[in-house]
Image (cartoon, helix red, strand yellow):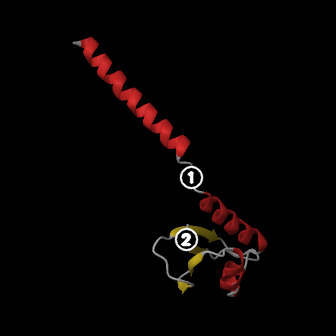
């Protein structure tokens, strides 16, 4: 009976291992996640006062062409309609040495 239990556990482990390997190899993470995160990092490095001055909407449209919406600390701006949207969040902690956090959420199409 113990041998049958060991075989059953081995079969379940092999099935799980093969399934996980197939998912990891044949379905890599999509590249739009990396591109949007890089765009947000570039915006953060470009200026620490973008969300506070009001020019973030204009700059984001230039940097991220497939943007659907932008939530800049409570002010929501829609640029187009879409059925599938991925949201990305960045937090600006402040500008010129001040501490006034602002959460910016971008929604993009895949």
> Horizontal placement of 82 versus 10: left or right?
right
* Residue at image point 54% right, 83% down: 80
Residue 79, image x and y in percent? 57, 84
Residue at disc 1, secondary structure: loop
In front of the other: 57 or 35: 35
Question: Dot 2: within a 10 Å radius of its alpha carbon, few (fewer than 14), some, or many (20 or more) residues?
Answer: some
Residue 6 appears in which quarter of the rendering?
A: top left
Q: Going 69% across and 85% down the picture, which residue do you hit?
A: 58
Label disc, if present, on residue 109 of the rendered structure = 2
Q: Which residue is drawn at 74% across and 68% down?
A: 42
Crowd band around label 1 with a 10 angstrom C-alpha radius: few (<14), some (14–19), many (20+): few
Q: Which of 64 and 98 is in front in this view?
A: 64
Please state which of residues 93 and 21 is positioned toward the viewer in this rendering: 21
Where disc 2 sits, the SS reads loop
Q: How many marks?
A: 2
Question: Is 91 drawn above or below residue 11 in the view shown?
Answer: below
Q: Which residue corresponds to the image point at 65% horizontal and 63% vertical from the top-left? A: 37
Decide which of tag 1 and tag 2 comes sooner along the chain: 1
Mark 1 = which residue? 29
- In the rendered image, which quarter is residue 95 located in? bottom right
Give the CA separation, mark 1 to mark 2: 15 Å
Residue 77 shown left or right of residue 37 in the figure: left
Residue positioned most to the front: 26
């Amino acid at each position: 009976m113990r041998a049958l239990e060991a075989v059953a556990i081995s079969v379940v482990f092999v099935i799980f291992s093969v399934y996980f390997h197939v998912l990891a190899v044949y379905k890599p993470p999509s590249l739009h996640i990396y591109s949007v995160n890089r765009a947000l990092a570039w915006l953060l490095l470009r200026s620490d006062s973008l969300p506070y001055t009001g020019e973030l909407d204009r700059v984001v449209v230039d940097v991220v062409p497939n943007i659907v919406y932008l939530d800049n600390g409570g002010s929501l701006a829609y640029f187009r309609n879409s059925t599938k949207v991925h949201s990305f969040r960045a937090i600006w902690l402040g500008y010129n040495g001040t501490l006034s956090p602002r959460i910016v959420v971008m929604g993009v199409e895949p």
